Image (tube, rainbow, N blue to C red):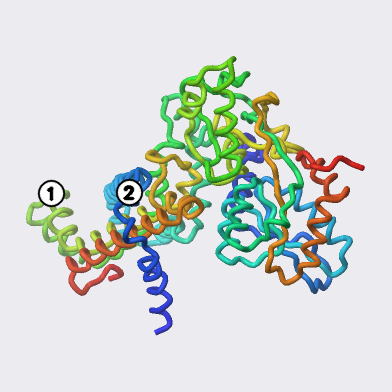
């Protein structure tokens, strides 16, 4: 069963559970305050550590993460889900919550950015070695759905390549014809590539750091074509503990928080001072 | 009647939230039409497969007794209580590229994951127990002496099965088949993992409802209402056919 144990299955389950997982980060002895943070799926690892580091400096505080696709979190927030902080993988979903009246537009700040990368199974069954190869007929490509931030960024990236002089306008439609599935969040895209079901997928650079890095191969996307994903964060307007929520946001934007993000493969917005 | 309120109120809310003015526009949208056609096609195929493959097994289970039979029956019932996500991962580990049958399927040039075949397989996996449980109960109620009598009269095995066994057990078989069909229509978790999500190919109604919920609530409510209406109509029709017997027997 060695071929099953590349971690792909675990990731798949983790990706699926991301839709509904609430994980307590800090098992403090008797936490009397709980801070609920809604974080985009691509922030799962970074915010797990972020929550623990923040709680370490706040006695009696426990950080509870709810991790899912940003579009799903935005929908939940607009349906009244109780939360203190929202960290989205794009401005669109943050704006949806601002429009829904749960977040004050003036409170929204960018805290990190991310880049796209093409990910291939470790054994590269389709033998891909350039972006041009994504247009090979019969290739099985998995993307996130256009409703998911990374899905929209993937479409933007393909459109950029199509419009460049080195490629032709048919590039994007040809590549899109190879898509076999539009997944619900970025971790499921990664899992299906790790499992080898897909020949290629498009995920964030931050999704393939640490142990995961060894289980896949990457095709870099050159800067001019890469789409920079901006992550906004804001306290939820009707939070019962606005002071704590504000301190968490400040922590994410502070040197310690930014270092955690950099460590997780995201691009911090504030360089170490 | 708090139970009844809890069961009926959410369905009522769906009807109240339906955008009646835009109903025809939503119904005619490609997302809805594709999902509806795919769901009816795959769900009916799955129900047919369940009846074809499940009937012989059910008959065997009803006629044999002993520990082995109890063990097999329990195995067969297992998908009913498993989370569908487990079914999806398990199916991937069998039919996926690196699954148990993966190399064999790849050698034969057969692609299952990400195709409507995967949708049907997922539906068969989760829906078969509903048919088999009903069919076993139906077959078990038939007196084996009747079958023996027919055989002594010179009827062939097939003749006995068709004219005696099935003729007597058909209400149970039909009820089971309808439950299997309805469960297939509602299948979500195993499908999104095993078959993926592609409009017109693997995006059945439940998947379109789930993704529509994040993108366009009107489409999600329209699809949800449609699914409820179709299921309700079929259940009523079958109940009428079976008289007061009911689906649960």
- x then y, percent, for residue B202: 41, 41
Q: Is residue A147 left or right of residue A102?
A: left
**Which one is in front, B70 or B199?**
B199
Check disc 1: other Cα within 10 Å, few if <14, some if 14-19, many if 20+. Answer: few
Q: Residue at x 43, y 35 (%)?
A: B112
Label placed on residue B156: 1
Eye-nearest disc, 1 or 2: 2
Residue farthest front in this picture: A106
Q: Residue at x 20, y 74 (%)?
A: B244
Q: Quadrant of the N terminus of chain A?
A: top right
Distance Cα–Cα, label 1 vs label 2: 42 Å
Q: Is residue B139 visible?
A: no
Q: Chain under label 2?
A: B
Which residue is tagged 2? Answer: B36
Q: Is residue A135 left or right of residue B27?
A: right
Q: Residue at x 55, y 36 (%)?
A: A143
Question: Where is residue B153, by image quadrant?
Answer: bottom left
Marks 1 & 2 on one chain: yes
Q: Chain under label 1?
A: B
Q: Is residue A61 left or right of residue B155?
A: right
Residue A104 lies, with reference to residue B9, above or below; the image says above
Q: Quadrant of the C terminus of chain A?
A: top right
Q: Is residue B223 left or right of residue B155?
A: right
- x then y, percent, for residue B4: 38, 79
């Amino acid at each position: 069963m060695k071929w099953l144990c590349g971690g792909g299955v675990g990731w798949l389950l983790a990706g699926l559970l991301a839709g509904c997982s609430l994980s307590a980060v800090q098992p403090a002895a008797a936490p009397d305050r709980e801070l609920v943070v809604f974080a985009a799926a691509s922030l799962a690892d970074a915010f797990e550590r972020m929550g623990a580091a923040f709680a370490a400096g706040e006695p009696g505080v426990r950080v509870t993460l709810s991790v899912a696709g940003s579009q799903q979190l935005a929908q939940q927030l607009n349906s009244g889900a109780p939360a203190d902080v929202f960290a989205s993988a794009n401005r669109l979903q943050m704006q949806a919550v601002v429009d829904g009246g749960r977040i004050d537009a003036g409170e929204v700040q960018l805290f990190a950015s991310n880049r796209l990368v093409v990910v291939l199974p470790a054994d590269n069954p389709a033998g891909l070695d350039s972006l041009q190869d994504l247009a090979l007929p019969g290739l099985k490509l998995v993307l996130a759905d256009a409703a998911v931030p990374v899905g929209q960024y993937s479409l933007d990236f393909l459109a950029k390549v199509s419009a460049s002089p080195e490629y032709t306008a048919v590039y994007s439609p040809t590549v899109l014809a190879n898509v076999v599935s539009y997944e619900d969040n970025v971790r499921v895209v990664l899992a299906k590539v790790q499992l080898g079901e897909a020949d290629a997928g498009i995920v964030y650079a931050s999704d393939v750091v640490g142990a995961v890095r060894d289980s896949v191969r990457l095709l870099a996307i050159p800067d001019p074509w890469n789409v920079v994903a901006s992550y906004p964060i804001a306290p939820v307007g009707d939070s019962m503990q606005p002071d704590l929520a504000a301190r968490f946001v400040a922590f994410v934007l502070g040197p310690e928080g930014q270092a955690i993000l950099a460590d997780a493969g995201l691009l911090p917005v504030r360089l170490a001072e | 009647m708090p139970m009844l309120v809890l069961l009926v109120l959410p369905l009522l809310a769906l009807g109240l939230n339906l955008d009646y003015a835009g109903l025809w526009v939503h119904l005619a949208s490609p997302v809805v039409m594709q999902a509806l056609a795919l769901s009816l096609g795959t769900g009916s195929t799955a129900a047919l497969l369940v009846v074809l493959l499940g009937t012989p097994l059910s008959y065997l289970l009803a006629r044999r007794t002993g520990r082995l039979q109890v063990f097999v029956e329990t195995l067969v019932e297992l998908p009913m209580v498993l989370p569908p996500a487990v079914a999806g991962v398990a199916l991937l580990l069998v039919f996926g590229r690196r699954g148990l049958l993966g190399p064999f399927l790849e050698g034969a040039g057969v692609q299952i994951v990400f195709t409507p075949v995967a949708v049907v397989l997922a539906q068969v996996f989760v829906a078969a127990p509903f048919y088999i449980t009903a069919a076993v109960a139906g077959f078990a109620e038939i007196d084996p002496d009747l079958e023996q009598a027919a055989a002594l009269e010179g009827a062939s095995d097939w003749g006995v099965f068709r004219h005696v066994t099935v003729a007597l057990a058909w209400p149970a078989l039909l009820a089971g088949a309808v439950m299997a069909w309805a469960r297939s229509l509602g299948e979500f978790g195993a499908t999104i993992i095993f078959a993926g999500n592609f409009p017109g190919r693997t995006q059945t109604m439940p998947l379109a409802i789930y993704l529509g919920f994040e993108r366009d609530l009107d489409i999600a409510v329209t699809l949800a209402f449609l699914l409820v209406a179709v299921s309700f109509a079929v259940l009523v029709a079958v109940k009428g056919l079976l008289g007061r017997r009911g689906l649960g027997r």
